[in-house]
Amino acid sequence: MLNFNSGISNSVNSKSAIHGCLEQAFGESGASTSDLLIIHSTVGHNFPQILAAAKDACPQAEVIGCTGSGVIGREGVSESMRSMAVMAVTGPECAVVSVDGLDGHNSKALGKQAAAALKDKLDGINMIYILTAGLDVAGDRVIEGIEEVFGADIPLFGATAADNGKAKGTFQFHGDKVLERGIILVGLADPSLEVIMGAHHGSVPLEGMTFVATKVDDNQILELDGKPAWPALLERVGLPANSDISETLPITGLGVTLNAEEQATYDNPQILRVPIKISDDRQSFYLPASVLEGTTLTLMQRDEQYIFDGLDGLVNRMTEQLDGRRPAAVFHADCMARGRLMFNRVLKDEIIAKMQHPICGEDAVPWLGLYGFSEYCTIGNKNHFHSYTTSLYSLVRRKAA
């Protein structure tokens, strides 16, 4: 049976941060018997020091993780340049694989390769936690590759890595290796656990602000309405031609309309994609999911009331499914732009509390969250890839038959 412990630290010393997280997670009992240590870090930490300190503290554990623009624990949110949160997992019913070299063109092939290696390592896997690079990835294709090995019924949940909002480079960890184009899969095979999950974005379509993707190459959008895609997008949102991707992230969410069945189990008619990388010639851009030629893309706008109302609905549905059970652990992938906009900053403590209290009550439920660039989460019973959402994944003990 798998057991979980979590902790968070704002220590600026990377070694001290790991020890602080583990001390918070385990108290005086120590973490040396952990079998898996998942680390989320902002980009200011020294990654080799993190990994060495983690291995020293948990010598038998597989150490994995990735960077984000902030981290979330049961104690709240931290977005400083040196923030860290961990989830320690104890028990033999888990296995890890990683593959390097990910990009938008090979996402399906590498997803399938990683999944096949994972299946060979552990029998009985009933859910997969996934972390991938965040800049050049087709997340939907990664899902397709995994499902070719495990079938479409395998629940997938997780995030893409991020940086401090600059979209310059994202990092993944496995063992003593720091990757920039990695896929990390964690297979969980505890039959007593199920995962209850849900996602919600808080954006609404802007009337008349649509494009047709007239020329694409997997996840690279070459033309919108027959024009070079990146200049066309910048012109429509009123930004200068030399705008950097970090300036456009908050306002260039593009919606793809879901089919009727998916809309019925999702609060939003559209699923969102975010331009995350520009071509060297600045004529095209990359989305973190593939798009078919002829797809209509709708410019979306953040709506604060919709964010909070939708989150209430998501949490209410999750608590109904939990049916009085407290989760064994909660994993969490989130968008950095969600929260209350005040003083020219998006404040996040309120929105995190609106998730944690209904799900956890007064219990100290292990919680690990990341502000990444995109999220893996189901809609209904189908695995999907999202951007700009809050995605929650509650691991809970099954009810006795």
Image: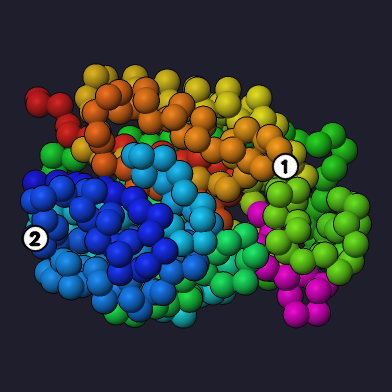
What x and y, as percent, mark residue 352?
46, 34
SS category of the residue bearing label 1: loop
Q: Residue at x 77, y 66 (%)?
A: 244
Residue 79 shown left or right of residue 120 in the figure: right
How many callouts does the rendering have? Answer: 2
* Residue count near mark 1 (Cα–Cα under 10 Å), binned few <14, some 14–19, many ≥20: few
Going by the image, does 387 lie left or right of 215?
A: left
Residue 242 position (above or below residue 350): below
Which stretch appears magenta?
Answer: 274-284
Q: Is residue 276 magenta?
A: yes
Judging by the rendered image, the residue that carries numbered circle 2 is 33
Which residue occupies 71% across, 49% down? Answer: 250
**Residue 339 location in percent, x, y?**
59, 36
Q: Nearer the viewer, residue 15 or 214?
A: 15
| Mark 2 secondary-structure assignment | loop
Q: Residue at x 18, y 73 (%)?
A: 56
Identify residue type, mark 2.
Thr
Residue 211 falls left or right of residue 69: right
Colour treatment of the image: rainbow
**Residue 101 visible from this viewpoint:** yes
Residue 216: in sight, yes or no? no
Position of residue 1 in the picture relative to residue 269 (left or right): left
Q: Quadrant of the C terminus?
A: top left
Which residue corresponds to mark 1?
344
CA gap, disc 1 and disc 2: 44 Å
Quadrant of the rendered image containing residue 353: top left
Q: Is residue 344 above or below residue 52?
A: above
As displayed, is residue 307 above or below residue 282? above
Specify the amino acid type for callout 1.
Answer: Asn
Q: Residue at x 71, y 38 (%)?
A: 343
